Image: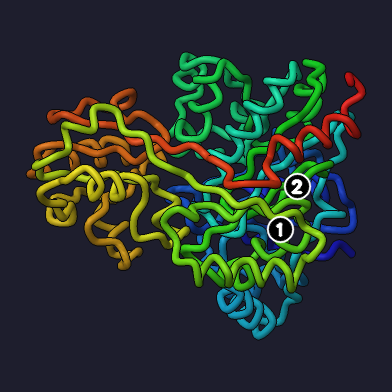
Amino acid sequence: MRRRVIIMGAAGRDFHNFNVYFRDNPDYEVVAFTATQIPDIEGRVYPPELAGKLYPNGIPIEPEEKLVELIKKYQVDEVILAYSDLSHQYVMERAAIVTAAGADFKLMGPNHTMLKASKPVVAVCAVRTGCGKSQTTRRVLDILRSKGLKVISVRHPMPYGNLVEQKVQRFASYEDLDRYKCTIEEREEYEPHIDRKSVVYAGVDYEAILKSVEAENPDVILWDGGNNDFPFYKPDLLIVVADPHRAGHEVSYYPGMTNLLMADVVVINKEETANPENIEIVRKNIEKWNPRAIVVDAASPIFVEDHQMIKGKRVLIVEDGPTLTHGEMRYGAGYVAAKKFGAREIVDPRPFAVGSIVDTYKKYSHLDLILPAMGYGEKQIRELEQTINVCDADLVIMGTPVDLRRVMKLNKPAVRVRYELQEIGRPNLEEILDEFVKTKCNKF
């Protein structure tokens, strides 16, 4: 008799675990996915075109709030937790809810979920959302390409649209972003690769994606992680980013601590703005839990276009959405720029919030003076646009990796804040990647 399973997720890791372990497995019947974190995912169906021959009608995607009801309705044997950036307390609360309802509670590890590539893989992951994976990935990409290597990046999934159409996505131009109707969250991750004239893949089926990537015959595959999840591909070098602004979170969030324990390299980022005591807490936790890891000290200084426009202005600050929401940061690069370059006032965006942006502030009550760049679909992008345009401010500071002016029309001036990773002292990423290339890349 097939064991009945529910996979708890957020339209990413959950689909991957299903695809690589459950899809064609006759010992299991996945009766439902549950969804949280991402709006408008629940109420849909994981399509039969992706679900395989055992699921001719697809698999329903239900809100996580219905978990206990679903366990009882389907007499579920196992519940698999398959999403990321969760406190250990939160994980064990879900374990208690599931086991009290009568099912087993499980987490799936790397051996059952990582795919083995035929090419060397460098993975960049983190202990929390918002540690600085993106700029670290860009730094790694630049170093590898400077050595004459062909690098193709693969980004952790963000499939918020038509799942069948998003099975395998290849991004090499801004037209590709438009063709796939990418959300703000997707553009934030893909645009920096396109800016560098570098190819990045993403989608839903990461085995099919891997085959497409390998067909392009890269020298290195670069895994660009999402949230604080561990890689979908088995890495030959795992670089994990930690954030001393949230010291201690590297050992208290799932699955970020898994990354910390597996890391070959840990980058302690943002040291230029962190308290020395907090940097030391992170350093001691690395030494305690993974003493074999190489530790790289780093900063993420900001670069502001037309910074003179900020001085004396009443500014609205828009920051990267996931970093502020489930990453639980109160501010980002935009706020740092406002303070550094003399903004007269930071305007509170909450009175001007429209539609789902109002709901975002209710759900994430730690946010006050910062507007998260929420844009999980066209409707929410328009609500974000309206919120920005009705806000009583002189200037918009965009602390987002994506230039919002590409996806909306703003009625006030805007400046963009960028940040790049800079290592402090030695060892540094170039030295580490030199050794990786010598030992793993057949080209040299």
Of callouts 2 and 1, the N-terminal one: 2
Residue 206 is drawn in which quadrant?
A: top right
State which quarter of the image contains the C terminus: top right
* Residue at 79 percent of width and 65 percent of height: 291
Contact, mark 2 vs mark 1 (Cβ under 8 Å): yes
The circle on residue 238 is: 2
* Residue at 60 percent of width and 67 percent of height: 282
In the picture, measured across the screen, residue 222 lies left or right of residue 340, that is right
State which quarter of the image contains the N terminus: bottom right
* Amino acid on which the number 1 mark rests in the picture: Asn
SS at mark 1 in the image: helix
* Residue at 91 percent of width and 34 percent of height: 439
Picture coordinates of residue 238, whole percent (x, y): 75, 47
Picture coordinates of residue 193, whole percent (x, y): 55, 25
When the figure is inspected, residue 320 is found, relative to residue 92, above or below; the finding is above
Q: Is residue 131 visible?
A: yes
Which of these two is toward me, 42 or 430?
Answer: 430
Q: Mark 1 packing: few (<14 Cα in 10 Å), some, or many (20+)?
A: many
- Residue that carries the numbered disc 1 in the rendered image: 259
* Amino acid on which the number 2 mark rests in the picture: Leu
Q: Mark 2 packing: few (<14 Cα in 10 Å), some, or many (20+)?
A: many
